[in-house]
């Protein structure tokens, strides 16, 4: 069984989808660590409900980004993590993590990359007036949302309401992330 870590900063709905797929046997994997940079985030509660170890930190507790990334690497190594899945983790991955886990960190992004990179991709796409939205899963490298694309799934949307669009994106994200992880772990 493969050992996964999920990094998240918010509500943790992608974390939940991955954990449930593991618990239900859909993924031959186990989420052994959840990393969160926002104490009090909903994902911390979700991790506790599923019995997943959580490393929750406030970046300002550390003298530098390199310091907290070294601590994350130490915890990933101790848990025997094989694949890191970013799921709404709102920090740029730096040299310490890339050096230790490069090629084993993936991210899910709510746009069809390479268009609309960064934290406000949905809003940017709506402002631009696109009629085809989608989700991208890519490897993480030193460039913001610039790593090699692993999978994408598109869907049409003619509206302009973010509250209507976001659930549509989630409906695509959850199964795409699980399917992509399956492929990456050789399942």
Image (cartoon, rainbow, N blue to C red):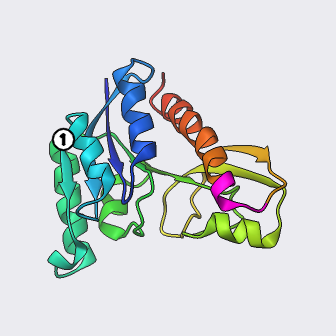
Question: The N terminus appears in which quarter of the rendering?
Answer: top left
Specify whether residue 150 is in view: no
Count all numbered tags in the image, as a single digit: 1
Residue 149 vertical placement versus 20 (above, below): below
Q: Observer-nearest residue: 77 or 46?
A: 46
Residue 61 locus on image (x, y percent): 15, 76
Q: Tell which of 181 and 53 is nearer to you.
A: 53
- Tag 1's secondary structure? helix
Expressed as whole percent of the image width and height from the top left, the position of residue 79 reads 18, 41
At 84% from the left and 56% from the top, the residue drawn is: 131
The residue carrying mark 1 is 79
The residue at 68%/59% (across/down) is: 113
Q: Nearer the viewer, residue 68 or 161?
A: 161
> Overall secondary structure of the magenta stretch?
helix
> Which of the 4 image quadrants contains residue 71?
bottom left
User: Residue visible at 39% across and 49% down?
Assistant: 12
Whether residue 78 appears in this view of the structure is yes
Based on the picture, tell me whether residue 161 belongs to the magenta stretch. yes
Magenta span: 160-165
Residue 100 vertical position relative to residue 78 in the rendered view, above or below: below
Q: Is residue 82 left or right of residue 90?
A: left
Tell me which residue sits at (63%, 50%) in the image. 136
Q: Is residue 118 left or right of residue 142?
A: right
Expressed as whole percent of the image width and height from the top left, the position of residue 187 reads 48, 21
Q: Which residue is nearer to you in this view: 115 or 54? A: 54
Q: Is residue 102 left or right of residue 49?
A: right
Q: Is residue 85 magenta?
A: no
- Image coords of residue 41 (percent x, y): 30, 58
């Amino acid at each position: 069984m493969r050992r996964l870590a999920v990094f998240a900063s918010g509500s943790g709905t992608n974390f939940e989808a991955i954990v449930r797929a593991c618990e239900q046997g859909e993924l031959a994997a186990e989420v052994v660590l959840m990393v969160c940079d926002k104490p009090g985030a909903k994902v911390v509660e979700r991790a506790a409900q599923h019995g997943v170890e959580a490393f929750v930190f406030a970046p300002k507790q550390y003298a530098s980004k390199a310091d907290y990334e070294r601590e994350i690497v130490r915890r990933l190594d101790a848990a025997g993590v094989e694949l890191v899945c970013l799921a709404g983790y709102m920090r740029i991955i730096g040299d310490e993590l890339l050096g230790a886990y490069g090629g084993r960190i993936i991210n899910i992004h709510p746009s069809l990359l390479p268009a609309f990179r960064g934290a406000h991709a949905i809003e940017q796409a709506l402002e631009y007036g696109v009629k085809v939205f989608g989700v991208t899963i890519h490897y993480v490298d030193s460039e913001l949302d610039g790593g090699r694309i692993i999978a994408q799934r598109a869907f049409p949307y003619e509206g302009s309401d973010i509250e209507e669009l976001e659930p549509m994106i989630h409906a695509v994200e959850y199964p795409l992330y699980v399917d992509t992880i399956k492929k990456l772990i050789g399942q």
